[in-house]
Image (tube, rainbow, N blue to C red):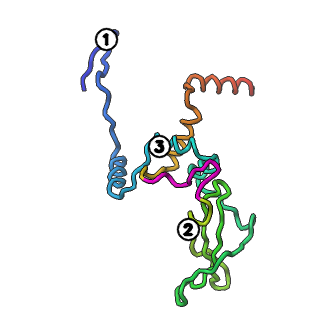
Amino acid sequence: MSTALSQSGQAIMTEPLKEYRSIQGDQQAERERKSGHVRMDKEDVQEYTKGASAGTVGCREGGHRFPTIREVGIVFEDEDGVPEGQKFAGCMIRLLRCTGCRLVGRREFWTEVDGDWECVFSKPDYTSFKKRGPNAESYLAPPGLGRMTRKQVRAAEAANLLHGQTLATIRRQIRAAAKAAA
């Protein structure tokens, strides 16, 4: 890296800094490389969030919202086909649908343990409900692009909403709102 003097006599860098990562950042990149779980590019995440419904983006950003037992009660859909002799043989299956995106379900396995009912296992269910949302989006990322994190979805949604606004404009809006509230 080289430096030069500005007109005011101060030293300035003439070459941009290289991107430096922390040790944790290097370790994360190495884990992603070894596991094959590559993160989706920022532009691809922004494109996904532009075309997705609010419910789908909300679930990608903050997690699914499944109804509680108080809201919908307990209705079992099926009985698990676990062979007799297993620890949790004969579990009853309860299927819930996310109230946000309506694209993903949760399959719960309930059994009687010492006279009380317990949910012994639950897992996401991507196959029981329709594959496309109201904007024809899929909950899952397009194949081959990598995976999206909640943080990436949040950043992409903010970038889409704030596109074209400057920091100065936002500051003026905040000051005007504070002045109007006072």
Choose between 13 and 40: the one closer to the eye: 40
Q: Residue furthest left?
A: 2
- Check disc 3 and report the residue beneath it: 44
Can you say whether 95 is above or below 169 in the image?
below
Whether residue 141 is in magenta: the answer is: yes
Give the residue displayed 63% in from the left and 80% down from the top: 79
- Check disc 1 and report the residue beneath it: 9
Give the residue displayed 57% in from the left and 49% down from the top: 61
Can you say whether 92 is above or below 137 in the image?
below
- Check disc 2 and report the residue beneath it: 123
Can you say whether 173 is above or below 109 in the image?
above
Give the residue displayed 59% in from the left and 46% down from the top: 52
Q: What stretch of residues is rendered in magenta? A: 131-143
Check if mark 3's residue and mark 2's residue have beta carbons within 8 Å: no
Choose between 77 and 88: the one closer to the eye: 77
Mark whose residue sits in front, 1 or 3: 3
For the N terminus, which image quadrant?
A: top left
Choose between 124 and 20: the one closer to the eye: 124
- x and y percentages locating residue 162 in the rendered image: 57, 32
